[in-house]
Image: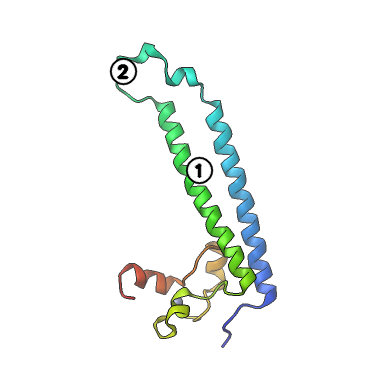
Amino acid sequence: MKSKYSKAKLAKFKKNILQKMEEINESIQGIRSSNLDVDENSLFSDNSSEDHDEGTESHEVEKNFLLMSRESDYLTNLEKALQRIDDGSYGICQVYTDDAEKCECPESPLIPEERLLEVPNATKGVFCKEKKKLNLL
Ligand SMILES: [Zn+2]
């Protein structure tokens, strides 16, 4: 049984991660520039002082900031994933690393390739992740 992904596979994962990072960077740029489009005067205009509605534009800005922080969190996680590729621990279920007997991933200790391509920042296999969520680990 393989306990590590081959160099060729890791290179493939790395490419996938770098591509995702690029997409996120673009998305963050997009959110930033859409924030700049918001006219500040409309946020603080006093002709709506009777209006207790917070206003859709400030709500929009808030939503964008939330989205932006989520995206940059994801970016940080992807950077960590890149580090794991470099140190060779990428794609190995964390539960296995902590306690090999507890990992019930079907390809233990490896996190399946499809999952890693879909969720490149995954540190656990789906099985272990769900068990952890249910406090079974
Ligand atoms: Zn596992």
What residue sits 39% from the left and 82% below the top? 102
Q: Quadrant of the C terminus?
A: bottom left
Image spot of residue 130 (x, y percent): 37, 69
Residue type of the residue flagged with mark 1 = Met
Q: As drawn, which residue projects farthest toward the top?
A: 47
Number of disc labels: 2
- Residue 85: quarter of image: bottom right
Quadrant assignment for ligand 1: bottom left
Q: Which mark is residue 51?
A: 2
Q: Residues within 10 Å of mark 2 (few under 14, many from 20)?
A: few
Q: Quadrant of the N terminus?
A: bottom right
Up-down relation of residue 73 to residue 58 (above or below): below
Say whether mark 2 is within 8 Å of ligand 1. no
Residue type of the residue flagged with mark 2 = Asp
What residue sits 44% from the left and 32% below the top? 60
Left or right: residue 6 versus residue 106 is: right
Up-down relation of residue 29 to residue 90 (above or below): above
Image spot of residue 19 (x, y percent): 65, 55
Image spot of residue 101 (x, y percent): 41, 86
What residue sits 50% from the left and 66% below the top? 122
Q: Is residue 27 visible?
A: yes
Say whether mark 1 is within 8 Å of ligand 1. no
CA–CA distance between discs 2 and 1?
A: 28 Å
Left or right: residue 114 versus residue 6 is: left
What residue sits 36% from the left and 71% below the top? 132
List the residue tagged with mark 1.
68
Query: Residue 13 versus residue 69: which sits nearer the camera?
Result: 69
Secondary structure found at label 2? loop
Up-down relation of residue 111 to residue 49 (above or below): below
Which comes before the other along the chain, label 2 or label 1? 2
